[in-house]
């Protein structure tokens, strides 16, 4: 086995920060190489150096690719020799078709006139390769994230890829789609495509990776070869955070006090397709001090369920009742839902949860401005005091609360969102994918915050696509499939297999609706 | 003692960093002063003659008043292209009410403000509740109200008006000391304003220090206040040498203070910034985004109406061309003042200084006898330069 890529003592400095310090990375031809590290460890910077986003000369060290010293001046240079990177934020044009996206900038054309027949034929071949059964003329807009990811890979394949880099490819995918993607990676490997995967999900790393390089604080900490030694998740975590993480889910005594919130007969129709019922007769409840999970595949309707409850922010023709403390509550607007004691931490914190250009302070008080004002006039000092309190309590790592939120890491941003909602004084917090895209250390802190909330007697509803997280954190888990809550399991009975089998059984029970979706 | 020393050290080191962080705020002020000094020199001292300073305020008052509303609309993430037409329409309406229908002034003014509110509500309704882009709604409004003012005036100029209506724009506050030249009221108002600014500045500093907020280095604070207060008192002194405080200056200052307070210190203001910064996040935080958007346009309509009244009063006649292309000056003033096209940022004081920069450019170049052709070119380049400076700063930071 020869090495396809060797990055030797790469050092990259930004004004005031050494982002990479003597990083070494060797990728063998035909393998899947995983790079792990906490957010901000330097993984993305390393990939940007590799792909020419930071051109040769702006960093120290050498890149040897395919036996030659590589000096990429830009992304085109690296793509030319087959190094292709798929970023976490997908770079597809939503209102163009699959075929147009795949050949964007690389069009099949004669004298500047598109050759549609050739374009569509090649697209069909590529889609077959990645296992996506869609019409090449379908607009990207109408595809889910999982399928979009596959289009990105098809696009990479169209460029004669030798080294494919996937940056957090499964971060936004459901369990099911993630598995499909990992299978595809293994298949590509069999066809001889060398791959680098950056991932936080260690079970996935373990499943596909032949070797693992761990980066911490801009330096290589360890390199492991799965064929020579056993790579355990614990070992990776230890290397990533630089300490032992014996328990990834901090323990919490089971508490279930008085009934806080009950949702009954909840029905919601799609906002645009009036005949499509998105939520069907959903019913669930949360008690004080309880952490209740909602499991399900992507597209099962979990986000739609909670958003339709919180201020009726999603869907049409919503019917059903929400009771707080046994009394029917008015949740018809977000304001009234907040007054009723609800808080909703959105799945997508950047576009739905935060005002990125504003300071931490202004984000923290946003949902409860009256809490820092008198007759409509904000007391800025009081506002600073409050946000400073949350900064310390939540351990938001930043010099001051006047820092803009966009400068924070994912984990710290999430803590700002949590602070905002805690300051609104809720009784029930609905957390939608609270640990998505944040690193192991910050996840642990979020879990601790959830446990604190439980201790304060608040009810927590938690949606997560990571089943181990639900199993590790929840007292009860509801299983959702195709808009209906199809089962309920206590912590003691719940297991990944049981949850999956509930979803699968449900599909078998209702073959007609299953086929229709 | 030790603590104090540390503080001083910190301040010394961060002086450059502080300046870099607030370059935009100081830059705008420095630019205005530099432009004024430049024209003062090249016009041989005409720019800062009492009569010209008075004229500067009279000429630009309606732009500044509309810039206040426009800033809020732009912060909320929208734009209003109709303000020039609305201003012209309301001026025409006032003229028709008073001259053709014989309505008294006391009835005409509130009626016209209500008309402005209704027009604003009309725009706001489509933007806020039907999500039609403000650009389109107000472009339509621009045509509609331009057409309606032509129709209302039947293509003629209508005037003149009663003295009491004219005084809305061309009146002066009488001298309470009875000296008249220099005008005592202007001097006293100037002195009071200086005391107020320094007092508020000191208060703010004390509070910032108490909560450990971003603190301006002492030297900067002193220099800034000396410059601002010096300029202010100088202007007041000059005004006192002509006819004193114009009425319109007083209403302008009051409005500026009120709107600065609303945008910076109230929950209402904060919510508008949040709405412009991230509408979805604001909505999911319980903010009534539709209602706020609607109100931003209602407010804009009212201020455009006020500007229309003041403009008509100054010319002492309403013409079908009144307010033509004024929306562009207003929007330019707001962007020169540092507001962001995408919404969520910008300050009232910035918009006012931006409007003054445009005003001084207009006035100075006219005195110099520069043709209207070059004037447009220069104003356009100033706008581009100001926004380029913003973008450059942002990319660098």
Image: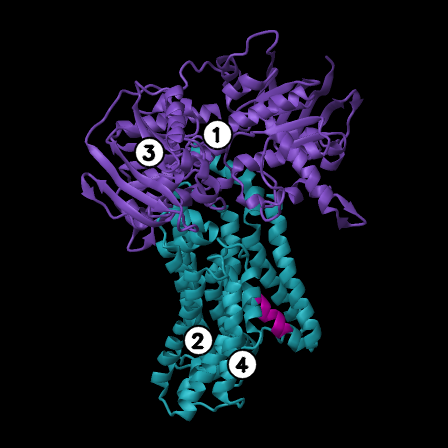
Chain colours: A purple, B cyan
Q: Which is more N-terminal, label 4 or label 2? A: 2
User: Which chain is mark 1 on?
Assistant: A
Q: Nearer the viewer's eye, disc 3 or disc 2?
A: 3
Whole-Å distance between the Cαs marked 4 and 1? 57 Å
Label 4, on which residue? B322
Q: Are marks 3 and 1 on the same chain?
A: yes
Q: On what subunit does the disc labeled 2 rest?
A: B
Distance of label 2 from label 4 (alpha carbons): 12 Å
Any part of residue B86 in sight = yes
Q: Residues within 10 Å of mark 2 (few under 14, many from 20)?
A: many
Residue B203 placement, left or right of A220: left
- In the picture of the structure, the residue carrying the numbered disc 2 is B305
For discs 1 and 2, the disc positioned in front in the rendered view = 1
Residue at 31% over, 49% down: A335
Do labels 2 and 4 touch, CB within 8 Å?
no
| Towards the viewer: A303 or A213 | A303
- Give the residue number, with chain letter if any, for mark 3: A485
Q: Which residues are magenta?
A: B357-364
Residue A57 horizontal/vertical position (percent): 75, 31
Q: Is residue B328 left or right of residue A162?
A: left
Task: Where is residue A374? Give x, y as percent.
Answer: 28, 52
């Amino acid at each position: 086995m020869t090495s396809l890529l060797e990055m030797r003592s790469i050092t990259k400095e930004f004004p005031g920060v050494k982002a990479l310090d003597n990083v070494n990375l060797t990728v063998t031809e035909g393998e899947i190489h995983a790079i792990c590290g906490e957010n901000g460890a330097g993984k993305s910077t390393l990939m940007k150096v590799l792909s020419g986003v930071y051109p040769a000369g702006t960093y120290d060290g050498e890149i040897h690719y395919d036996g030659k010293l590589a000096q990429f001046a830009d992304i085109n240079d690296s793509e030319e020799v087959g190094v292709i990177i798929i970023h976490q934020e997908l770079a597809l044009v939503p209102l163009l078709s699959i075929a147009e996206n795949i050949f964007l900038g690389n069009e099949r054309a004669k004298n500047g006139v598109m050759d549609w027949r050739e374009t569509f034929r090649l697209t069909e071949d590529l889609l077959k390769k990645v296992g996506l059964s869609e019409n090449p003329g379908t607009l990207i807009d109408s595809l889910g994230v999982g399928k979009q990811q596959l289009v990105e890979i098809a696009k990479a394949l169209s460029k004669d890829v030798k080294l494919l880099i996937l940056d957090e490819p499964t971060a936004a995918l459901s369990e099911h789609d993630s598995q499909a993607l990992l299978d595809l990676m293994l298949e590509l490997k069999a066809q001889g495509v060398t791959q680098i995967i950056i991932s936080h999900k260690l079970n996935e790393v373990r499943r596909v990776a032949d070797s693992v390089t761990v980066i911490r604080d801009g330096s290589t900490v360890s390199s492991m070869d799965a064929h020579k030694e056993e790579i355990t998740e614990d070992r990776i975590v230890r290397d990533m955070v630089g300490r032992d993480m014996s328990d990834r889910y901090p323990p919490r005594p089971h508490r279930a006090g008085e009934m806080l919130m009950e949702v009954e007969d909840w029905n919601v129709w799609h906002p645009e397709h009036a005949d499509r019922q998105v939520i069907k007769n959903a019913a669930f409840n949360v008690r004080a001090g309880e952490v209740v999970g909602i499991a399900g595949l992507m597209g099962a309707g979990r986000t739609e369920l909670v958003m339709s409850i919180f201020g009726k922010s999603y869907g049409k023709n919503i019917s059903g009742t929400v009771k707080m403390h046994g009394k029917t509550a008015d949740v018809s607007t977000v304001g009234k839902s907040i007054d009723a004691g609800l808080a909703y931490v959105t799945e997508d914190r950047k576009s739905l949860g935060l005002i990125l250009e504003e300071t931490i302070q202004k984000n923290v008080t946003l949902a409860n401005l009256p809490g820092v004002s008198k007759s409509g006039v904000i007391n800025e000092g009081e506002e600073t005091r409050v946000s400073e309190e949350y900064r310390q309590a939540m351990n938001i790592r930043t010099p001051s609360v006047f820092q803009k939120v966009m400068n924070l890491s994912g984990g710290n941003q999430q803590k700002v969102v949590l602070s905002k909602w805690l300051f609104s004084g809720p009784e029930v917090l609905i957390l939608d994918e609270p640990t998505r895209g944040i690193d192991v250390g910050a996840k642990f802190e979020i879990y601790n915050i959830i446990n604190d909330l439980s201790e304060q007697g608040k009810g927590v509803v938690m949606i997560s696509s990571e089943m181990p997280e639900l199993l590790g954190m929840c007292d009860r888990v509801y299983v959702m499939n195709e808009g209906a809550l199809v089962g309920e399991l206590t912590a003691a009975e719940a297991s990944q297999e049981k949850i999956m089998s509930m979803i699968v059984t449900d599909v078998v029970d209702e073959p007609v609706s299953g086929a229709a979706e | 003692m030790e603590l104090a020393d540390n503080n001083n050290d910190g301040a010394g080191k961060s002086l450059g960093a502080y300046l870099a962080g607030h370059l935009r705020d100081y830059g705008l002020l420095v630019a205005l002063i530099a432009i004024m000094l430049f024209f003062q020199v090249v016009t041989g001292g005409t720019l800062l003659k009492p009569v010209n300073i008075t004229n500067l305020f009279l000429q630009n008052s309606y732009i500044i008043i509309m810039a206040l509303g426009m800033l809020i609309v732009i912060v909320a993430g929208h734009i209003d292209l109709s303000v020039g037409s609305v201003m012209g329409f309301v001026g025409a309406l006032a003229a028709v009410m008073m001259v053709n229908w014989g309505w008294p002034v006391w009835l005409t003014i509130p009626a016209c403000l209500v008309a402005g509110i209704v027009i604003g509500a009309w725009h706001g309704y489509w933007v806020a509740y039907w999500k039609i882009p403000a650009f389109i709604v107000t472009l339509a409004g621009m045509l509609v109200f331009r057409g309606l003012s032509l129709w209302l005036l039947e293509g003629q100029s209508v005037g003149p008006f009663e003295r009491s209506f004219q005084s809305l724009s061309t009146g002066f506050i009488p001298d309470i000391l009875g000296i008249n030249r220099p005008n005592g009221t202007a001097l006293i108002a100037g002195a009071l304003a200086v005391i107020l600014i320094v007092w508020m500045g000191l208060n703010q500093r004390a509070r910032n220090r108490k909560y450990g907020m971003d603190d301006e280095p002492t030297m900067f604070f002193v220099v800034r206040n000396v410059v601002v207060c010096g300029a202010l008192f100088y202007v007041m002194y000059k005004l006192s040498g002509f006819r004193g405080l114009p009425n319109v200056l007083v209403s302008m200052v009051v409005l500026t203070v009120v709107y600065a307070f609303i945008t910076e210190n109230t929950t209402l203001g904060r919510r508008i910034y949040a709405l412009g910064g991230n509408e979805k996040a604001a909505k999911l935080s319980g903010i009534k985004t539709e209602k706020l958007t609607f109100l931003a346009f209602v407010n804009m309509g009212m201020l455009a109406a006020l500007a229309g009244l003041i403009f008509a009063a100054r010319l002492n006649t309403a013409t079908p061309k009144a307010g033509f292309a004024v929306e562009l000056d207003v929007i330019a003033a707001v962007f020169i003042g540092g507001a962001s096209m995408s919404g969520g940022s910008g300050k009232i004081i910035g918009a006012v200084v931006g409007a003054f920069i445009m005003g001084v450019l207009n006035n100075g170049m006219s005195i110099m006898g520069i043709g209207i052709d070059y004037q447009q070119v220069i104003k356009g380049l100033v706008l581009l330069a100001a926004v380029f400076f913003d973008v450059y700063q942002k990319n660098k930071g």
